[in-house]
Every structure is written in structure tokens, then in C-alpha cells.
Image: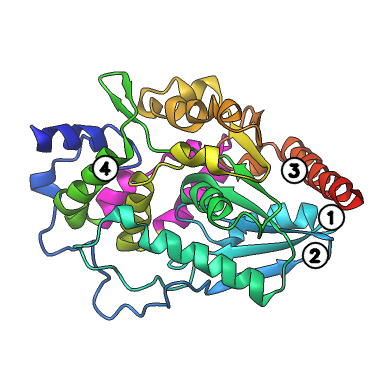
Amino acid sequence: MFKLFYKHWFITCLVLITAQVNAQKSSNNNINNLMHTKGYATSVLGDIPHYTKTGNGLQSIILIPGLGFDASVFKDFIEANKTKYTIYAITIPGRGNTKAPPMPDTSISYGEQTWTNGVIQGILKLISKENIHKPVLAGHFTCGSQIALKFAIDYPDTISGVIILGGQAKFISIQSGKVIDYTLKDMIRGTDYFAKSWFKTKTEKEWNKGNYLPEIYSISKKTGKKLWKQVATVPVPVMVRYLCEFTASDIKSLLANVKCPVLILRAGFNSKILNNPANNYLKPQFIDTWENASSINTHIQIKDINNSGCFVWKDQPSETFKAVEHFVNSLNLTSTKGSDK
């Protein structure tokens, strides 16, 4: 019963491997995605191996890419805003041409958030190294959103605010058309079980087949395919680790603890994408999980970016950048008023 319960939970989510894949036929017992491949050179946990710095504006923004992406996806964001802000775009270890940290022992729960916490520590070091005064953290998509908000909770005096770029608050399951919002305890237990019984032996082909569809990234087919291809270059063990740490987390339950201003730029997609049966998790996960965020915490404001995928600034650049500018200006206004007291 327990096995079937969690198996159904994860298969129903498109991010994970699709239900059409026959596990017994397609899995390769010689594959172990819970470990790095033999000879893989690792980075140091808690370091950010690569980042770019552009612009000379008074307000600094640190851009945190979502699951599978590196700093290069922010090139257009940076180009459009480099005269307004000083922009740091980080590459999370294991993405792009960087190496991931050592893989934690399989006895360590994904709920420990080992790699996620390592990224948070890396951002903290970056702020200290570059002497960045009260930056805004902009977290993108899956993982990037969680990192930005968790940083805000852990180090509230270090930053000015948080912007969420098309991300979701937590993993939501769909079972027989019914939305299931699991407790963190069950999320962790299910993730720890399923990593070993399901993700461990998935081939690269199987993993990519079950990944987010290109239309989730962008409503532009050309842009969506290009972004999908970048994700497909990341080693499967690295993707498994970051994804499992996401599904074993629940930042929504911690929103009341955020003490700085937060702007949620919520991807609205479009009716064609939302009505695709394969995307039945999109609205519950990327839209509805933020629905009462402003009621939970008055520091949080939500702006919908309609007709956009999770790369809101690529699909609706003008609307996105205006919202970012308005938010940043409001932070500076609040800071100025506070200094006058």
C-alpha cells in the first residue's frame, strides 16, 4: 500500500518520469543516479563556482537560476537592466560547465536539503566577498524560488527583498484529477523512498522524456525548445539530487517567517497550455500555491504575468521589468523613509 501510494504520487507529476515508462523494461540496474558517475570531479559544498557581475546601479540584484539552468539564461534580463542595477547572476553548482558538490551518503534524507543549503551558504559568501549591500534576491522557477525565500528566512538582515520569477511554492500532486497537498513529513518520506526505488536507475533518455515540457518554460516554441535543451545537458544524478531536495521541501509553510518585502511574479501561461491534460499540475502548483500568500504575510505581493511560461521575462519582458523596477523603487523609498526617522 505504501509503495503504491507514493509511486502514484510521483508518476502523476510530469516533472518526474511519466507513467507510460515501464520501469521493469526500461530501467538499467547498472545505473545509479544517486551517485556521481565514476571519475566525476566535484566542487566544494558551500561555494558558488561561477557568477557574472554586470552594471553599476546602486541597487544590487542576485539572480538565481531554476532547476537545470545556469547564469546564461539571464543574459537578456541583464542586458535590459544593466544601467539600473548591479546584477550578479550565479550558476548553481553542477549546471553549465560547473561541477556539483560531493553526493551525500544515501542514508542522508533529502529533507536535510544538503545541496540547497550549500547554495545558500555560497550566496552568503558571495555577498561578503563582493561587499554587496542589501541585495535583492531574484529566484527563478523550481529550486531558485525556494533558495531565495529560504535565504530571506535564514538571513533577513542581509537582503532588501525577494523577487520570485515564475516559480512555485511547493510540489503539489494530482491523483485522478484531485489536488493533493501533502504535509512536509510525507513529502520527505515519499521522496526518500522514491529516489531509491524509481529515480536511481532511470536512463538519460527516460529522464529527459519525463522532464518539464518546453511550453512550461516559454509560450514561444523556439524559446521553449532552446531552454529544454540546456536542461538536458545537466547530468541526471545532479538533476535527481536538486529535484528531490525540492520535492522534500515546503517553503509555503514558512512564508509567515519572511520579514522582507517579496514580489511574486506569477506565470499565467495560457489556456492552451493549462488545458493540456499533461499539464494538469501547472495551475495547482505554479499558480494556486501562491493564492493566499499575501494573507499569510503582508510583506508578500503577487503580480500575474499572463501569457508567459516560467521564464516570465522572456515572454513578457516589458511587463516583468516594469514590475521589478517598481518593486525595487519601493524598497529604496522605504529605506529612505526609515533613515529619516
How much space separates mark 3 and mark 1, taking CA atoms?
A: 11 Å
Task: Tell me if 29 is positioned left or right of 67 in this view.
Answer: left
Image: 19 above or below 86:
above
Rendered-image quadrant of the N terminus: top left
Give the mark, 3 or 1, whose residue is nearer the N terminus.
Answer: 1
List x then y, in percent, for residue 248: 33, 47
Q: Which residues are magenta?
A: 204-232
Picture disc at residue 55: 2
Q: Mark 4 or mark 2, which is nearer to you?
A: 2
Image: 215 above or below 108:
above
Given residues 33 and 247, the one toward you in this image is 247
Q: Residue at x 75, y 64 (%)?
A: 133
Give the mark, 2 or 1, whose residue is nearer the N terminus.
Answer: 2
- Residue, disc 3: 324
Quick one: label 3, few (<14), some, or many (20+) residues within 10 Å?
some
How much space separates mark 2 and mark 1, taking CA atoms?
A: 7 Å
Q: Residue at x 44, y 61 (%)?
A: 117
- Residue, disc 1: 84
